[in-house]
């Protein structure tokens, strides 16, 4: 057995411990008490002191997320070896890679569909198809591996579901669906790129047959980087995939803190039972609504090895509006009567963390400017939370960038840039929360730009395209 992944994991945990110790020293959790004898009521006044303490204690709201992230990082190998096929790719259940799009970026979809077909061919996958579900016909290249489904403008669901959920539900309708209950669906966004490791992980996950749903890691810093600010800000999402998302799916087998809308592996029969017809309250964050509904119905979730590639938003404005949509979508899920509260305690903590961000993020400046005497245990807790957050960004960079592509000096630099980007990310996310809370409509769906003008050259071998099916009803 190769010991190298375990050595890397040990070094990663050591890095986390070092960061936590540094934070504890800076926060006064260990070492001499630098504020002994300091009276904030005398220095700042009663009102200001009470406000400062209140703002400081609000930062404890995300403690459960920090704990789950810590457990996911520590309990499971942070540098797992690349998955290897456990069975032949020529047999087994049929796999449908389903891409949902408005049809706004046809060139992007065409390019990525072909690249994903090439990846599947590279590992010898034979029993599969790629379905592109679009509101507007794109006339994709003809291929036996490709099916284009155009959602009719007049199509409405029973509960008047909208947006992506409406398109996903259309695929499940009789006369449109061509999958059996034993087939599997892999949900992708229009910019999602498969990798060999993700396809192998999907095949292994399906053939093991232990769970009805699964999800894996997505990274955002591959190939051309359009916006460095948003890409670096999204590094925390990679860290959270390896942290609390992996722990919840791998150990608890439940989407406690929701899950992403892509890299979803779902049994086709179960998905048809649940459907996506949740109404308007499940139309913004349809992924979260679907996951919690499946959990409520008693289905089990697992973690899929391997990673897929996506791109971060191309501008700061799109980044803010993406976060706005997430906040509004989770808000609608939380207040939906269709899902009992006991399945929503994870997203309730997410909402509380978001709603109080305008009050907690200023602590970045207030803590060093207005120090407060605290019990050591409080300082230790604050230090651990801050250290874990910074670590998730650094770890996200470690997993997203490659020293082979960037060179070691640039790679090391990129791994420690998160020290600077963390406050920027928190401010941008806070702006997104404020925009969401100020919006009168909690059901708007902002579409971000996903297509670049530069075509990225890759070394993925190309296949000759042949036929596709465009289906209208």
Image (tube, rainbow, N blue to C red):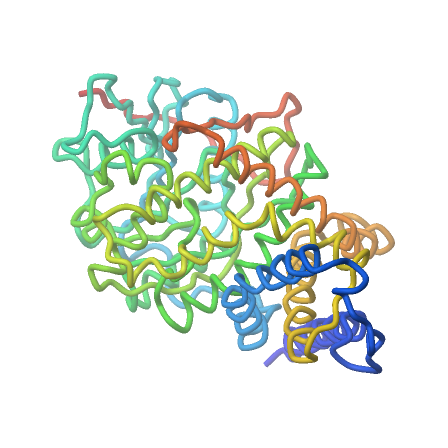
Is 255 placed left or right of 77 in the picture? left
In-front residue for pair 425/127: 425
Percent across and percent down for residue 341 are 28, 58
Image quarter (top left, top right, bottom left or bottom right) of the C terminus = top left
Percent across and percent down for residue 81 are 58, 68
Q: Residue at position x 45%, y 58% from top?
A: 349
Q: From what the image shows, is residue 261 above or below residue 381?
A: above
Q: Residue at position x 73%, y 53% from top?
A: 364
Q: How many marks?
A: 0
Is 322 placed left or right of 254 in the picture? right
Is 299 placed left or right of 32 in the picture? left
In-front residue for pair 297/250: 297
Image quarter (top left, top right, bottom left or bottom right) of the N terminus = bottom right
Q: Residue at position x 76%, y 65% from top?
A: 40
Q: Residue at position x 76%, y 56% from top?
A: 415
Percent across and percent down for residue 99 are 38, 36
Q: From what the image shows, is residue 287 above or below residue 89?
A: above
Q: From what the image shows, is residue 196 above or below residue 134?
A: below
In-front residue for pair 445/405: 445
Q: Quadrant of residue 14?
A: bottom right
Percent across and percent down for residue 142 are 37, 24
Q: From what the image shows, is residue 303 above or below residue 458?
A: below
């Amino acid at each position: 057995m190769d010991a190298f992944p375990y050595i890397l994991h040990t070094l990663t945990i050591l890095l986390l411990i070092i960061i936590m110790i540094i934070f504890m020293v800076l926060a006064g959790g260990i070492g001499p008490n630098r504020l002994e004898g300091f009276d904030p009521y005398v220095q700042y006044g009663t009102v200001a002191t009470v406000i400062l303490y209140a703002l400081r204690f609000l930062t404890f709201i995300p403690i459960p997320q920090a704990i789950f992230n810590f457990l996911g990082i520590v309990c499971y190998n942070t540098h797992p070896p690349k998955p290897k096929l456990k069975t032949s790719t020529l047999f087994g259940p049929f796999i449908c890679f389903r891409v949902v799009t408005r049809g706004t970026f046809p060139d992007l979809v065409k390019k990525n569909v072909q690249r994903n077909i090439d990846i599947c061919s590279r590992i010898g996958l034979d029993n599969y198809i790629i379905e592109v579900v679009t509101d507007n016909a794109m006339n994709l290249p003809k291929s036996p591996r490709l099916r284009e489904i155009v959602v009719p403008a007049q199509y409405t669901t029973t509960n008047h579901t909208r947006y992506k959920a409406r398109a996903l539900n259309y695929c499940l309708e009789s006369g449109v669906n061509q999958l059996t209950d034993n087939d599997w669906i892999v949900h992708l966004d229009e910019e999602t790129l498969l990798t060999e490791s993700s396809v192998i992980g999907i095949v292994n996950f399906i053939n093991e047959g232990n769970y009805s749903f699964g999800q894996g890691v997505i990274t955002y810093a591959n190939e051309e980087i359009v916006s460095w600010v948003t890409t670096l800000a999204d590094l925390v999402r990679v860290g959270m995939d390896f942290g609390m998302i992996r722990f919840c799916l791998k150990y608890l087998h439940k989407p406690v803190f929701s899950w992403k809308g892509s890299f979803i592996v779902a049994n086709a029969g179960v998905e048809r039972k649940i459907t996506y017809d949740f109404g308007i309250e499940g139309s913004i964050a349809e992924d979260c609504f679907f996951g919690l509904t499946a959990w409520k119905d008693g289905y089990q979730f697992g973690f899929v090895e391997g990673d897929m590639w996506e791109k971060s938003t191309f501008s700061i404005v799109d980044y803010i509006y993406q976060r706005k949509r997430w906040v509004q979508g989770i808000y609608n899920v939380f207040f939906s009567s269709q899902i009992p509260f006991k399945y929503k305690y994870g997203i309730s903590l997410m909402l509380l963390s978001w709603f109080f961000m305008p009050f907690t993020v200023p602590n970045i400046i207030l803590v060093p400017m207005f120090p407060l005497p605290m019990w050591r245990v409080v300082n230790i807790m604050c230090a651990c939370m801050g250290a874990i957050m910074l670590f998730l960004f650094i770890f996200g960079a470690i997993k997203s960038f490659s020293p082979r592509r960037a060179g070691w000096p640039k790679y090391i630099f990129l791994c420690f840039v998160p020290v600077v980007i963390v406050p920027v990310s928190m401010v941008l996310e806070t702006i997104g929360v404020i925009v969401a809370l100020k919006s009168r409509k909690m059901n708007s769906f902002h579409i971000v730009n996903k297509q670049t003008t530069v075509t990225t050259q890759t070394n993925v071998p190309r296949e000759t395209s042949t036929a596709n099916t465009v289906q209208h009803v």
